[in-house]
Image: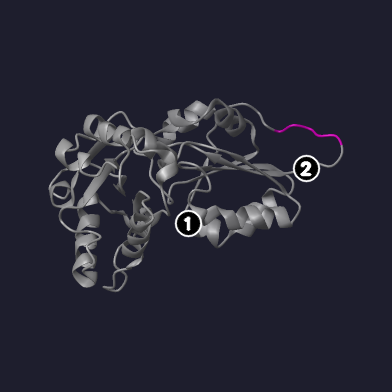
Amino acid sequence: MKERNVKFKGKRMGELIFIGMGLYSEKSMSVEALEIARSVDLIYLERYTSIMPGLNVARLRNLLGRDDIIEVKRSDLEENMYKIISEAQSKKVAILIPGDPFIATTHMAIRVEAEKKGIKTRVIHGVSILTAIPGITGLHAYKFGRVVTITFPNGGRLSETPYDVTKTNLKCNLHTVLLLDIRVEEGRYMTIKDAISILEELESIRGEGVFSDDRLVIGIARAGSPDCKVRADILCNIKTLDFGPPPHCIVVPASLHFTEAEALVVLAKAPKEIVMRMVVK
């Protein structure tokens, strides 16, 4: 391992750097991300906001040429963030984050607090599920509305927010990305089949046709990986498919441009007769 104890003349200035790792594995990191991760004084790795199915920590340590990567839990960053902020006052500190650092808003509080204390912060962006979905599905990037997460029931109660958000997006003729709950520390990863069961239950409660059996939905598994799976079909058919290991997400399209419809047929094996009925003339 390289020696990183460098002598500085005068006052040493710290920095807090948020590094996006991309979607699949340590190989998804950009050249800039790798260079910075190799050079910082302290480096943390969090894996609770999302999962990277191909990430291997041993390979990551070897790729970066350092064995001092500190794996942190949610509580380490959220409840003890001032420890990291304090370290960044005099050292260059990096936090490795799946996807793009602030797609999940979890870490923004750390950045804001650091800036308030006069600590320089920087973001090295990575590919996120939100930037990958248009390429995976062929849907136009500018036609997406608000993003929402389907969460596991809390005390037996279901959040109706996914229903409300999808309903509003459809009314505005915007596609909806439904992220699925991930609770890494509990070992719980919502699947597309789990999510559709929740959506069907919400439909039975609300009865407004947002998630009827004939609603076109797109299931995506392991975006960015060599075995990414994407399928588009009506809801009652999608729930019967095996999408394999997580992470999973769902997209609910609004009306389609003819190029979007063609892409869904080719890329997501969508039934042609269904998508063509959704094309705006």
- Which of disc 2 and disc 1 is earlier in sequence? 2
Q: Position of residue 160 (x, y in %)?
A: 32, 68
Look at the image and tell me whether residue 151 can be seen: no
Q: Is residue 281 left or right of residue 122?
A: left
**121 displayed left or right of 257:** right
CA separation, marks 1 and 2? 27 Å
Q: Residue at x 65, y 56 (%)?
A: 112
Residue 74 has which mark? 1
Q: Where does the image place residue 115, in percent across and percent down from the top left?
A: 71, 53
Q: What amino acid is labelled 2 in the image?
A: Met
Over which residues does the magenta segment extend?
5-9
Q: Answer above or below: position of 157 versus 96.
A: below
Res. 14 image quadrant: top right
- The residue positioned 16% from the left and 53% from the top of the image is 214
Question: What residue would you read off at disc 2?
Answer: 13
Badge 1 element: helix
Q: Main secondary structure of the magenta part?
A: loop
Amino acid found under the numbered disc labelled 1? Arg
**Depth check: 67 or 280 in front?**
280
Q: Element at badge 2?
A: loop
Which quarter shows the C terminus? top left
Which residue occupies the foreground of this view, 36 or 228?
228
Whether residue 204 sits left or right of residue 261 in the image: it is: left
The image quadrant of residue 280 is: top left
